[in-house]
Amino acid sequence: MQMKARTTGLAAMAIILAVMPLTFPNGYYYDIADTALFNAVVCVGLNLLIGYTGQISLGHAGFFALGAYASAILTLRWHVPPLVALLAGAAMVGSLAFVIARPILRLKGHYLAMATLGIGIIIFIVLNTESWLTGGPDGLTTDNFTLLSWKLKGDGGWYWVGGGLLLLAVWLSLNLIDSPVGRALRAVHGSEVGAEVVGVNTTHYKVLVFVVSAVFASVVGSLFAHRIGLITPGIGSFFRSVELVTMVVLGGMASTFGAVVGAVILSVLPHVLTAFEDYEAVVLGLIMMTTMIFMPKGLVPTIARLWRRRRASA
Amino acid sequence: MFAEFLQYLLSGITVGAIYALAGLGFAIIYNSSHVINFAQGEFIMIGGMATSSLVAAGLPLWAAVLLAVVITMLVGVAVEFFAVRPARNADVVAVIIITIGASIFLRGLAQLIWDKESHALPSFSGDAPIHLLGATIVPQSLWVIGVSFLSILVLGWFFNRTLFGKAMLATAYNRLAAQLMGIRVKRVLTASFGMSAILGAIGGIVITPITYTNYEAGVMLGLKGFSAAVLGGLGNGLGAVVGGLIVGIAESLGAGYISSSYKDAIAFVIILFVLFFMPNGLFGKRGTERV
């Protein structure tokens, strides 16, 4: 049963991804879709941390930005091939996350929020200040993503890479959750002490998930840098970290598809709201408050529950 | 040499006082509800912006200040009533999102009501600098330090000497027991948001003549206030005040002696170090978890 739900979910997503471009009238839609896909991959990773282990990170945009800057700097200044730069960035972010994970994940609740927030802000300030390396507030321009002689470009290309990456991320995430690791993670979320008592090495799992989610963010950051062509420290700001967490929570904590839905909604929303640009912050704030008040479990789990209830009563 | 140090110290105490007020705001709300109110910085911003625009509209300073404090208090009460109260039983993460949502909402609203420009306020008693052992201090700094100190004293009196203050403390210690003793816990919660908003507004008003303010000014001030509260140990009022002063002074010394571009990072570096070694802050209680 579990198995079946997983494959149908993945298949449905693949079909939606394949059909979507048919409805895009022009390149602008690809821009939006690519952003949505990138955000979705980051959120799938972040959801593992927030939704399944019950930890919070208010600094994930920092990891995203580090990945992006690693790619931009390595390809631009030292002409490292993009794929190698991407992997180097991921390795660097992964090691950084690994080093800070232990002391940080000892913290709970608001203390953890504070610590992750602090790390995000420190990364942001470093990117802003070390202009000799990062270009400071003006940022860095980046080149196309190339692999040997193949050059990733145009509207469609990035969409398929993003889509493929998202399917891969969702597949990985669903598998991780259904594995013994996943069950251990959920035990950590339920009660950390309880999990420890029954023999789960909680620190080990929390560190693992923290590193995995940071690497997800870094890889996407690298790709984003090539896609967008110009990166500024703003991509690692506190606001971006908050946005990522909001996507996860809005779509539904502890729901992989929920994280995807939340990411897509919040990525598309600003483009829908361009007509009322001045009201964007007000509307975003209202959405954050009302969904959390009326649907504290997030969109997807709430809708799924309503659906089941209707089916049961019918 | 010493004069330079004194100069940094004085400006550190000035900003530290504002962080202390913000930190106290976090502590009061945390105590009554275990909520971290990320909109605390917006209270500071609203206090400054409202006073500035009311003075610009021709009101005398004292009237503008009074009105701005009342407006900010009402905003604080509204945040509690419309956003925090309906989410009583939600997850910590959900409540964090709600108060961050409230802060983004208030910032957006401020940008609509006012604009994106910087707003000034004249100093309360002139700009002639006062010389002190080789360092100089503007009169407004004395206002900031004096008013903050007075606010903290009044708050101390309120919590230790008035019935309602004691009721709030009782609620902080044990919510259920307080409720059983006939304390209206809901009212305590509302009052805590109102009081935190007042503290924020006061800080925002006294600092605006020195730093100016704009619709985004609350973001960093709020986060520094949060650092102050965490540094002192969440829920410890005195700890938050000490934490605020530490953050302010360290920031000012760091900006002076190390690098001014890393001024904003210093607070967070300190907080990370402290949390790595003392996960409950400097003066926080050691918590135990029930399964």
Image (tube, coloured by chain):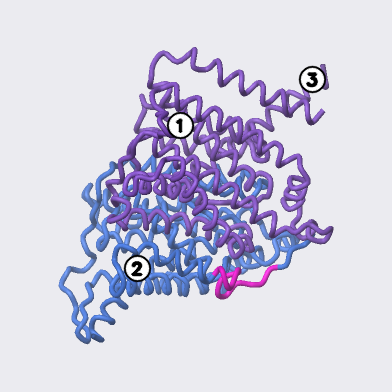
Chain colours: A purple, B blue
Query: Does residue B286 show up magenta in the picture?
Result: yes
User: Can residue B75 be spotted in the picture?
Assistant: no
Separation (CA) of disc 3 from disc 1: 35 Å
Check the image and report above or below for B215 versus B146. above
Dot 1: chain letter: A
Residue at the farthest front position: A149
Q: Is residue A307 visible?
A: yes
Q: Position of residue B201 (x, y in %)?
A: 39, 57
Question: Which residue is more in the foreground, A143 or B149?
Answer: A143
Q: Position of residue A145 (x, y in %)?
A: 40, 34
Give the secondary structure at mark 3. Answer: helix
The amino acid pointed to by label 2 is Val
Looking at the rendered structure, the secondary structure element under dot 2 is helix
Marked residue nearer the N-terminal end (3 or 1) = 1
Residue B181 colored magenta?
no
Out of B234 and A42, give the one closest to the viewer. A42
Read off the residue under disc 3. Answer: A311
Residue furthest left in the image: B128
Q: Which residues are magenta?
A: B275-287
Which residue is label 1 attached to?
A35
Q: Chain of mark 2?
A: B
**Taken as a whole, is the magenta stretch helix, strand or loop?**
loop
Q: Chain of mark 3?
A: A
